[in-house]
Amino acid sequence: MQKRSIIRAAVAAALLGASALALAQDNVFKIGLILPMTGPFASTGKQIEAAAKLYMAQNGASVAGKKVELIVKDDTGTPDVTKRIAQELVVNDKVNVLAGFGLTPLALATAPIATQSKTPLVVMAAATSSITQASPFIVRTSFTLPQAAVGIADWAPKNGIKKVVTLVSDYGPGIDAEKYFKERLQFNGGQVVESLRVPLRNPDFAPFLQKVRDAKPDALFAFVPSGAGAALMKQFSERGLDKAGIRLIGTGDVTDDDILNSMGDVAVGVVTSHHYSAAHPSAVNKKFVEAFTKANGNLRPNFMAVGGYDGMRVIYEALKKTQGKGGGEALLDAMKGQIFESPRGPMFIDAQTRDVVHNIYIRKVEKKDGQLYNVEFDAIRDVKDPGKVK
Ligand code: DHB
């Protein structure tokens, strides 16, 4: 008898323990942040992780009565790894949101997991137009290459650049950049005389730049992913393309704020179009840059950091609105249509496309107090992804 009551008490205690655990679990909101933290795209991971942590430090780790837990995982920039990590995060950790995605193939590999598990997936970096169509659970806070490429294709012919060679990394965002730049330049009366594609990993730009030199265009239009711009800039100058009177234009990935200062004077005067510059002259951005720089040993935030920072905002606001009720679908619905001021300027998540709508700025690299900056001098307002405008 006594033995039985002891067992009963033990079972009751275990159940109580289990339900307390379940309650504790219920009170945690988990964000699985999958990023390339090592390998050739590690700078993207570093920027986004730092920005996500800054957002949490500024806004608290408790939202709608839940403790927000950020689980950071390194996918090394390899699609199979990203997919496996996402599966583990959903099945074992039961994350409420998947986020990050440093490159297009990583986002595309994971899209089916978001769909099957009805988990919102916030793309903070990858920028091929079609990504948001890969799953109805994808929301994007980065940008799209068609958005960025069209801006410079409008600027160039008005500024004496008619004949252009394009050079892009040979994968989704590069192909988007090449296509939308070319179409728009031709529409504006210019001409792309040659289109070159370089490998995504370890590109040697030299043979391609020789071809550019031989073609004698007014300008080279380039897209390479964040982190690769410094090597391109160095070889552009070493091959004497600048001295030959060929201008360099591109999307802002090429004059990435993260590495701009290491490019030296060859970068001065390079004109690009993009959604974010660390030099964006707004109070919100000044505060962001100051806090980010201070928290990260003087590291300057780039457009990847802003995609991560804004992604966290979209997640936090959706959690506030739903109070954690209604699962992934309710959370996704609360992400759609958010409108706010980002460090990049005004920003909107289009409810129909789940893609970002924002300004695209035309910027020129200038030296200020010994530092290089992308200084904005013109803006195209509220640009929707041209890849989706029919
Ligand atoms: C992508 C990656 C980048 O680093 C970038 O600057 C733009 C696009 C991508 O893989 O989608």
Image (spheres, helix red, strand yellow):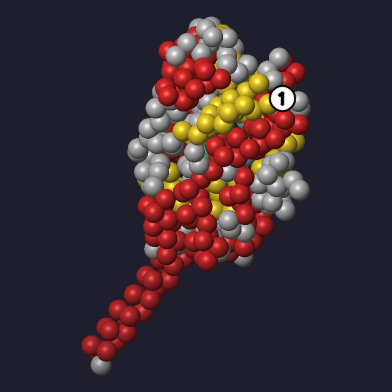
Taking the view exactly as shown, the residue that stands out farthest to the bottom is 1
Residue 140 higher or lower than 277, as above or below? below
Residue 7 higher or lower than 272, as above or below? below
- Nearer-the-camera pick, 190 or 77: 190
- In the structure shown, which secondary structural element does the residue marked by tag 1 occupy? loop
Which x, y percent locates residue 243?
52, 7
Quarter of the figure that contains the N terminus = bottom left
Which x, y percent locates residue 213?
51, 17
- Nearer-the-camera pick, 175 or 318: 175
Q: Residue at x 72, y 15 (%)?
A: 159
Which x, y percent locates residue 293?
48, 24
- Residue ID for mark 1: 190
Q: Residue at x 52, y 66 (%)?
A: 116
Q: Could you tell whether 286 is left or right of 171 in the image?
A: right
Which x, y percent locates residue 302?
52, 28
Q: Residue at x 71, y 14 (%)?
A: 160
The amino acid type of the residue labelled 1 equals Gly
Residue 317 higher or lower than 95, as above or below? above
Q: Residue at x 40, y 36 (%)?
A: 201
Q: Quick one: label 1, few (<14), some, or many (20+) residues within 10 Å?
A: many
